[in-house]
Structures are given as C-alpha cells and as structure tokens.
Amino acid sequence: MSDGIRSPYLGPHVVGQRVVVRRLVPGETGPTGGPAFTDVLGECIAWDPCVVVTAAGERVEIPVDLIVSGKPVPPRPSVRLRATVEECESHVASLWSSVRTTRVGAWQVRTSATVGRRRANSCLAVTDPGIPLPAAVEAVRAAYEDRPALLHVEVGSDLEADLGALGCTPAGGEADFLLAGATRALRAAGRPSAPVELSVAGSRASAEVSSACDAVAEGLAAVDGDWIGIHDLLVDPARRRQGLARATVAALLEWGVEQGASTAWLHVEADNVPARTLYESLGFVTHHRMRYLTLPA
C-alpha cells in the first residue's frame, strides 16, 4: 500500500466491493485555503490505480498516492426495496383474474365473487385516502355491503393508529411482504430436484409436482408488469423437506423471468418459519408487514 493512503481499509482486497474514497485534487485549494479533496462513491473494479464506477456509470481512475482515506460501504439498496408499500401491495389484485377493484379516494377496494381469500376481498389502505378518514371508512363499509368489510393496512403505520382511534380493530392475518430479484432468486433455487409441470394461462401460471398421478407440490404465480407474485405454495406434508417447494418456486420464477419479470414478491405468514427459511435462502427480504382491521360496529 502506498504511503499516500491513510486508511487501513483500502487495498487490493476491496476490488469488487462498493467503496467510498476520499482523494486529493492536485492544484486546487479547498474552502479553508488548504488542499482540496473530493469523495467518490461506487464499485471498485481495479486497484493501483484505483478504479471506481459510480452509480451513474462514470468510471473514475484514482492514483493510489492521491488517496487520503476511504472504506468499503454496504451495497446499494435494491431499487425495489425503495418502492412504497402502496406500490408493492398494488400488485395483489393481479393474482386472481376475478378480482375487481374500485376506489375510495386513494384506497383500493378489492372484491371477488369466486375467490374467498381476504386479500381478494379487502380494502388496501396504506396511504392517506385523500378524503376525511371517517368518510373513507364509511365508504368502505358501503362497498362491502354484502360481506364483512376489512381494511388491509401496514402494521405499525400512522394510518393504522389513526384507524384504531376510529374504532377499527385487528383481525389477524399478519403477513410479511417479501421481495427478491427474480433472476437472483432463480439462480439460488438451483436445478429442480423433481420434474415440474407448468401450465400457463395468459399472465398467470401454475406449477405442479406429481407422484402416482397425485399432486405432491403446487404453486401459482402471476406477472404484473415486471413483477412476478408467487402464492398458494403447497406441499404434501408427507413429502416435505425433499426440495419440492424449491423446485416449484424455481419453475414459476423461470417462467416469470422469461416474461420479463425482474422482481419477485410474495406474502408469508409472520409465524411460518419453514416457509421463511426457504424464501430467505432464495434471497427474499422483508419489505413490510401487513394485517387486517375490522371496521367499528
């Protein structure tokens, strides 16, 4: 390492990592009259000279003897992880073709005559509705006049607290929304341990692993833009821990990537440890947690 470097954290070992590097700018004077310095943030792709590629794609070459300090920094968060809760949850309705959506202000009212799931028959309320909150709650009640009215909200949000103050009460169903890069998750899934039969209908697909003509594992997926949502993953209890769930997810991810999906998402119950272990091994991370609220009497 050159005598010009005052940081023990930089060297050939940081090649391939995201770094911040402070360098001397020869011939320039800083604001206090001393030497001028500037910082460069990006991925180090070479050393001596140090070459850093910024997020904008700019290639910056820094002679090692001009480096004053620096260190590795955490990877840049995924663009999808910076998506809002509303954007993430808005893809739920695409999972089932029979789900119809209407609006109560900025809230999305979801209904289905054939799907009995609460996600398909609840109002997505994760942002300010844009109208007085009591009026929004009453409008949701009217929208579900033929069935129980439920609000689907982000756990711990200010909106959930405000709805609680109006008398809305938790109705269970806590689940985490997980995200992963679709291609990365597919690579992590590896080669299927069992043959998977895939059926496609438009933007939706089903995957099934069969044994003796009976399904022992199955799952569904839907592509919405460049997002693929995976849901209803089931494995015969007698055939668990045989890689069937991983094989099923891999088949669905492969189909989604072929359709142009770059982000995979799913909901998993907060206390479903085996499922969480599988998804985390594929690179899925938690974005937020949701639960249902019932409206006041």
Image (cartoon, rainbow, N blue to C red):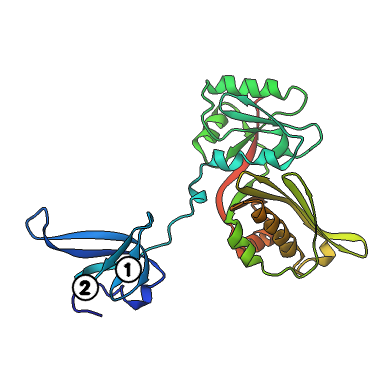
Direction from residue 189 to residue 23 in the image, left or right: left
Which residue is pictured at 70% across the width and 55% down the height?
255
Which residue is pictured at 58% across the width and 19% down the height?
135
Q: Position of residue 43 (x, y in %)?
A: 38, 64
Q: Position of residue 123 (x, y in %)?
A: 65, 31
- Bin the neighbour count of mark 1 within 10 Å (Cα to Cα): few under 14, some 14-19, many 20 and up: some
Mark 2 lies on a secondary structure that is: loop
Choose the circle earlier in sequence order: 1 or 2. Answer: 2
- Residue farthest along the right direction in this orientation: 212
**1 or 2: mark nearer the eye:** 1
Q: Which residue is mark 1?
A: 51
Say which of 224 and 85 sits in front.
224
* Residue type (three-letter) at the residue carrying disc 2: Arg
Say which of 253 and 165 sits in front.
253
- Image quadrant for the N terminus? bottom left
- Image quadrant for the C terminus? top right
- Bin the neighbour count of mark 2 within 10 Å (Cα to Cα): few under 14, some 14-19, many 20 and up: few
Which residue is pictured at 64% across the width and 20% down the height?
139
**Res 6 label:** 2
Q: Position of residue 144 (x, y in %)?
A: 72, 25
As drawn, 216 above or below 242: above
**Res 39 label:** none
As drawn, 98 above or below 205: above
